[in-house]
Structure formats: structure tokens, C-alpha cells
Amino acid sequence: MKIKRFCGIGASSGIVKGKAYLFSLGRQMPIKRELQEKERKEEKAMLRYALEKTKEEIATVMEKIKNDFGAKFSEIFNVHLALLDDPMLIPIAERNINKGVNASYAFSEAVRMVIDNLSLHSAQAGRTIEILHDISAKMFYHLGERDYKRLEDIAEKVILVARNISPYDTASIPKEKIAGILCSMGTQTSHAAILARALRIPAVLGIPDIENIVLQDDIIILDGRKGLVIVNPGKREDELYQRRKKEEELEVYFKEGLVHLPPKTKDGHRINLSANIELADEVHLIRKENADGIGLFRTEFLFVERLDIPDEDEQTRVYSEIGEIAYPHYVTIRTLDIGEDKIPLFLKEKGSSSLRAIRLLLKYKEIFKTQLRAILKANKKGNIKVMFPMVTCADELIKAIALLKEAKCELKKEGVLFEEDIEIGTMIETPSSAVACDTLVDLVDFFSIGTNDLIQYTLVVDRTNPDTAYLYEPLHPSILRLIKNVIDVGHKAGVWVAMCGEMASDPLYTPLLLGLGIDELSVNWDVMGRIKKAIRDATMDEVKQIAEKALSLTKPEDIRKFLNKEAKWKEK
């Protein structure tokens, strides 16, 4: 069998080998059956039975998610329940049965009508349609259309291959049977990715058409950290896999020994090592991993996959809980970073790469101010920071800060107690903000470099596109010079400079980033030990020389070779 190699988005780390299980084999199309008059009552009863069973299944999953990850995360399934109660769905299906067709076909026709009535040009339509197909599959199962594959029926441990895994499916996954997840759709911030990380299941997403490339029972090696996938590996790939597994085992050993040691170089230079989190419950790990704080708390999970806007009280409770648990450590809350494929269902917007994050929030100021008020109210102990994403110019930052001041004034007038002196930061993740960060530096207390978008926008490369993904290069000289400029400008003005992008989570880059002068690395929990080891193996004299040499080289491949040669963290 021919070996095939792919590179996608490493959504949940871990390296596994297993047999492919194709989960999505197309939409079901129930066969139309003409009913006798006497059968209609029975078919309507079946429809109601299927509705109740489907709701029960969703409620069970919601309870599981609530117990495992918290109540707020389970609320994403309210959309499923709301669509099942849509006045155009079950009533129309019942009318179809009255016209003399079987329940499953009647329901499929009702779904088709609902989809036809959606505005297909809205950003929400695609996600609503996906949810409708998701609940349809469950309804069909209870209506006797048993061709539908259920995760519960998987007999052996496999790597799940699909076009997409819905949040419902991810939440239903029998963890003991799923070694890994491989999808053509999804991003690092999709709910499937978040849940895969929470469940500690390695996952690679964003490899186009992978569900049609991989065959049932193909053998797959999946590296969820690097986003690499090898289908039908040969002897050489098998040996590489075995070596990587041993490296992972050693990492656990090193991590356990390092966890109580500070992220300090051999000559005593201390930097902050903090964590990126997406779920409120992850903040509990701050003590287990001995992290300095939360360098990035993504708030998107509160907003997407729901029909309503989370109100101020709801947001305040979540942010307060995180602040309380983390105290005395800091928590950096990033304001809502949505746009493109992450437009919430309650916004009537088309997805757009240019209307996202702070630009979208400045258009919807009430949503923005509600979030800012909630963050301020949660900051009772003074350990919460606020950070604005996708800033491209000083004007955007000035408007955001003005809105923050407005929120403070309102709360003071209302007599609400909060720590007014909150630290303000901005993400540096666009070429414009990296080049002109001197125009931003006086407005903030800290910068946080988001390398994922910075690389993507600087090199004009979509890393999910297989035709251009190879151009995604953190070591491109332009990227290194932009990072250096941000650090130099920040330090000259006395501003703290952190990095929270993926580049921070790769120990190969750690000496280089230390040498460039970074103050803080905010990384994923699973790599914290590796990054700490890379820090503790270095001296500042060494890393400064490494940075100077790297900046003098013109080809990314030469820089990579040089860093690999210098990588002491690899030594055993």
C-alpha cells in the first residue's frame, strides 16, 4: 500500500498509531414509503418517540459535559434542543405524515424545508445546517434508519476519520475506543478541538478531503502536536513512531522532575512560564503544573454555538471563578476573538477575514462593553488583565480603551466594587501592529505576540491549504525581525512582552526567543515541562549568541539546522 503523508492543524497533542475508522459516510436519505390511512397515527407516535429519545440523548450528553467541563460548556447543546423545537420542524413533519408518507421521510423533508428557508449567505447558515444534520441522524436512528453509524458501536480502539466531528459526537466519544481524531474540517478553536484536548485525545484537523482519501482499516500514524499524519506507514515511519513514543515517555519523566523548579536559566535569568486555556476548568491545573499564571484565556467558548448572547452576569460568574481559582496568579482574559468561521449564531453577519476580533466588537459595542464590564466586575482581587486581539492601529486600541473607561465609569456610578487599576495589553499578531508597535506601546502595559496569525498574515499563507501550508515558516527572517522589533520597542518603553502563539510551545525555538529577550512564554499545558527544560538548560550568554546568529541567516532552513544543532534540550 502506498505511503501517504499529510500536514494539518495539530489540535490536540500526542502521537498514536491505529486503524482508521471512517465515521462520516455521507448524509442519510430515508426512502419514501406510502402509508395506509391506519398507519399514520402510528408513524406520528414514532416521530414523537424519536423526538423524546433524541432530546434524552442530548440531555445525557449535556449532563456529562456539565460534570466534566462545567455548565457553561454544556450550553452549546441548547442550540440542538432549540432546533428540535423549531415550529417548522416537527409540525411540518407531522403534516407530511398526514399526507401519507412514513415518519423518517416526512422528517427529512421538514429538515430540507428548514434548510431552504435559511439565509444560505449568512455565516450562521453553515453551522445551523450542520447541527440540523446532526440531530437528523439521531432522529433517523430512533425512527429505525439504522444505517447511521454510532460512536457507541465502535468495537476496537481506532483513529476516527471524518469530514467533521460535531460537538455532540466529540462529547459522546467512548474515550477507551478512540486513539485519535482526524478530520478535514475544524480549527484549533473549534469545539471539537477544545473537547479533544480536554479529553486528552490526539487530534489533527484541517486536512482537506481526508475522509475520502483514507480507506476503512488503513493504518495511520497521527502526531497531534505537529499536525502530521502518515497513512500506511513503512518500516522507516514505524521506527520513527516508536522513537517519538519513547521521547514522549521521557518527557513525562522529565516533567515530573521539573514541575517544582522555576523556569530559570543556568545563570539565573527568570522568565514567566504561563498557560493558554480555553475552558474555565483548566485553570485548576495552574498549581499542579506550577505555572506563573494564565497568559491567554480564550473567551470564545462562551459565545459560539448558542442562539443568545451571554449576559453580563453569566460572563461575570465565569471570569470571577477563573480569577478566584488562579489567585494569586494572574489571568489574562482576551476579549472575544471571533470572525470568519467563528461568527456566533446570534450575530447577523457574514464571515469575513477583515471583520473579526476587535473590529467586530467595535461594530457591536454593546456586546463589547458587556464583556468589559464583566471582566472588570470579576477583577475584585486585581489579578485579572484584559487583552485586545487583532489590533492593527492605535485608533482601534484607543477606541477599545475608551470603551473600557466608559465601563469603569458606569460601574463606579452603580456602586460596584472592582479593582480599577487593571492591566491592559494588546495582541501583536498582524504585520501592521508588529512594525508600528511603537504607536501602540504607550497605550498598554504589555504586548503578547500571537505567532499563528502573525506568520499567516506576514507570509500570506493559509496553513490549512495543502498547496501553501509548506510556506508557513516561523523561522522566516521577516518573522524573526518582527518579533525582535516588538520586544525591543516594548522593552525600550518598559512594557512587558509575552508570546502566546504556537511558536512559544515548541522547545526548538525557546533558546532563540530567550535570546531575543522575550519576558513570558504562554504555552499549552502538555508542553510546559519541555519548555521549562529548554529554559533551564540554557545560559543567557548562549541564547543571545543563538539569536544573533539566527538573525544573521537569510534562509529558514539554515536557521532550523542551526537551532537543531544547538538544541541542548534534546540531550538525554
Image: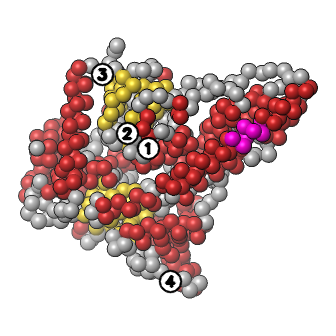
Disc with the residue nearer the chain's start (2 vs 3): 2
Q: Residue at x 8, y 63 (%)?
A: 267
Q: Which three-letter amino acid code belongs to the residue tagged 1?
A: Ala
Image vertical order of residue 359 relative to residue 169, above or below: below
In the rendered view of the protein, which quadrant contains the N terminus? top left
Image vertical order of residue 141 relative to residue 258, above or below: above
Q: Residue at x 33, y 58 (%)?
A: 275
Q: Marks 4/1: CA distance?
A: 38 Å
**Label 4 Cα crowd, 10 Å radius (few <14 / some 14-19 / many 20+):** few
Magenta-tinted stretch: 47-53
In the rendered image, the residue lying farthest to the top is 1
Magenta stretch, main secondary structure, is helix
Q: Nearer the viewer, mark 2 or mark 4?
A: 2
Q: Which residue is mark 4?
A: 417
Image vertical order of residue 518 relative to residue 115, above or below: below
Q: Marks 2/3: CA distance?
A: 18 Å
**Marking on residue 104:** none
Disc with the residue nearer the chain's start (2 vs 4): 2
Tell me where residue 94 appears, x and y as whole percent: 83, 36
In the rendered view of the protein, which quadrant contains the C terminus? top left
**Label 1 Cα crowd, 10 Å radius (few <14 / some 14-19 / many 20+):** many
**Marking on residue 233:** 3
Q: Marks 2/4: CA distance?
A: 43 Å
67 or 463: nearer the eye? 67
Q: Marks 3/4: CA distance?
A: 60 Å
Disc with the residue nearer the chain's start (3 vs 1): 1
452 or 484: nearer the eye? 452
